Amino acid sequence: MSKISIIIAREFNERVRKRSFLITTILTPLLMVGLIGAMIAMMTMRSGEVKHIEVIDSSGVVASRLESTGTIQYEPTQRTLEEINTSHPDTWGVLVVGADVMTNSSNVQLYTYSSSTLETEMSIAGDIEQIVEAEKLKGYDIENLPQILDEVRTNVSLTAYKIDDSGSQKESSSALAMGLAYVLGILMYMFVLLYGVQVMNGVIEEKNSKVLEVVVSSVRPFQLMMGKIVGIALVAVTQFIIWVAILGIAGAAMIQFMVPSDVLALAQAGAGAGMPGAVGMTDNAELVTVLSNVMDFSYIGKMLVVFLIFFVGGYLLYAGMFAAVGSAVDNVQDAQQFQMPITLPLVLGLIGMINAMQDPTSSMAFWLSIIPFTSPMVMVARIPYGVPGWELALSIVLLVATFIVMVWLAGKIYRVGIFMYGKKPTFSELIKWISYKS
Amino acid sequence: MDYIIQAEHVVKQYGAFRALDDVSVNIPRGSVYGLLGPNGAGKTTLIRIINRITAPDSGRILFDGHDIQPSDVELIGYLPEERGLYKKMKVGDQVLYFAQLKGLTKAEATRRAKDWFVRFGIESWWGKKVEELSKGMAQKVQFITTVLHEPRLLIFDEPFSGFDPLNAQLLKDEMLRLRDQGATIIFSTHNMASVEEICTHITLINKARNILSGSLDEVRAEFGAVEVREVVKMGKSMNDIFIEAVGNE
């Protein structure tokens, strides 16, 4: 076994055997599944709450035609607003429709006894609009108006297709892409930062426990640094693979048990053939598209591969810098000042990622996904929407070139820093170490 | 003369600070070689260069008569002044780790380590974490990691600082035992009494330069009173020589 692989093995084993690794690796995906479950539960709970609205209608047109829905109950009343104000046991709010609502459509007021929501207000306004519109149409005295209206009423369900370079079409879901972009971007940020800091803390620990000089009498300082960086990278990749496996199994189980079988069949057809048109036959177009995307292994698989490539590149870039900082200081407190310039581009990448999530083809998203320091976060956020091959290749080449230079520079600082005890160095001293002969 | 280490005109510069200035040292095989000098004189830098931890700006190091190779560090055991162990790692794993880094197979390292643990009567520590050990206990483990690969050259940087008297005595005994088995020993120290007791040769380094080298007798002859050569013990103490030589600089 070569010396660097002995170091990698130690770094890997010491971390993977820790109880904290086991706990975070198993619990995090379970927590994520639980969180999604809780969100769904909260949404269903909210829809169960019924709002009773008393309607005072001076126009005589609106109140009788308002149709109650599951969550909004319209109750026409003869009482005045003052009377209701004195006694309103079940009433959520009072809707006052003016007598001239047909000509003055803004003469509608809603008084509520608890805080209102935009969703409810828009729903009420929409209901009144429909009634007023229908009433106005009636004024034109058109024959068979109800039938005409019924026939005219259309509900558009948009299916989006993404045409790739080879010309083949693929149903795409912007909602899914956005969700994936967000998850992948945040995950990238977390992984690079958390594992980068682990490298730094590992170096500081070695320096603190004075074990460093013992080790570098057997191996080159650069081998020790790279062994640590690679060992920790393997820990991260292991954790990621376990997460994907757990989420994949949990997701498959959820799809199997919670999705109606006809929707599932359509989605499977879509995933296999990438056939346009299959989705048109159902009301659940969005759901089918999401499912067919999720079950399409080449779509998800490509994303995972790109994520891993950019994680390894981005991590190596930042881990090198973190190792250099760790070597220069004696304790974690002293490291904070040097961490700033490292975390700044990371945070910039996070902001760029949110931008890219909303508009993946904007020039800001483009440049930040090409520039190496931000590209890992921003590129993975763009990937679910589809990225031209040359952009991907350029970004990867730049990232690899930068991390090679950065690791080389970091190694130069590291080999000097590990022997510096006591005084905290300045930035200019750190830079000066690069020029020292080994 | 048969030398295990020959340092020839070694220069090492850190920025504006010259740590070693044209230092040449010849270390005879089988000797116990003391590197003396005040703090900051350059002893540790020289030791690190011999260990290939840093490279000299100019000059060269010969090991066994050839330019020192990367693989030669497997024949060297080094106990640095800044020494320690991984606190959260188990004692046994740790000893095996360092032995493997020195080129031993895991099986061979395990066999030898068990022998040493029995010798020191510390078999029960094998599965303990280092942070559970006392400082004195950790020093014993540290010593084992230094010698487990049976190096032909042992280098100790300030070995007697930080060791409790019991471990210092143990260390001294083990050093002499290893010398008797054919190892060469280099150590740097401030402790002149230990120099008189076990060194056969010394070099005195001050302000980055080698100001005095030779066997103990030669050094005494140069600095000591000639008339008492036959009763060496009555000559100048190493302490006096140290102060005189450094003071003259």
Image: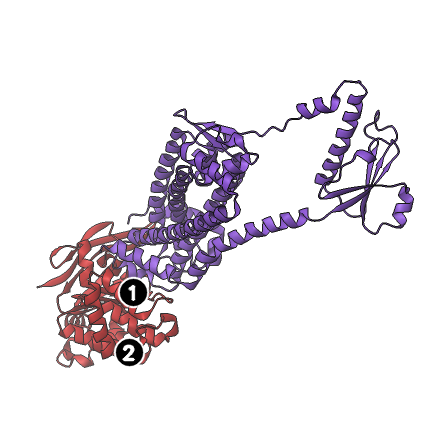
Chain colours: A purple, B red
Quadrant containing the N terminus of chain B in the rendered view? bottom left
* Amino acid at the residue labelled 1: Pro
Other residues around mark 1 within 10 Å, as few (<14) / some (14–19) / many (≥20): many
Residue A54 seen anywhere in this rendered image of the structure: yes
Residue A221: name its quadrant.
bottom left
Question: Could you tell me which residue is drawn at 16 percent across and 79 percent down?
Answer: B232
**Of residues A313 and B159, the one drawn nearer to the viewer in this rendering:** A313
Q: Which mark is residue B80?
A: 1
Marks 2 and 1, how far apart at CA: 23 Å
Q: Tag 2, which secondary structure?
A: loop
Chain containing the residue with disc 1: B
Give x and y (percent) for residue A37.
56, 51
Q: Position of residue A389 (x, y in %)?
A: 39, 30
Residue B238: image location, x then y, percent: 24, 74
> Circle 2 is placed at which residue position?
B122
Comparing labels 2 and 1, the label whose residue is closer to the camera: 2
User: What's the chain of the residue with tag 2?
Assistant: B
Residue kind at label 2, given as amino acid type: Ile
Tell me the element at label 1.
Answer: loop
**Residue drawn 20% across and 63% down?**
B104
Please check whether the numbered discs 2 and 1 fall on a single chain. yes
Q: How many marks?
A: 2
Quadrant that contains the C terminus of chain B: bottom left
Is B179 on the left-hand or right-hand side of A338? left
Q: Nearer the viewer, residue A317 or A19?
A: A19
- At 74% from the left and 24% from the top, the residue drawn is A146
Between A398 and B159, the one nearer to me in the picture: A398
Q: Is residue B231 above or below residue A169?
A: below
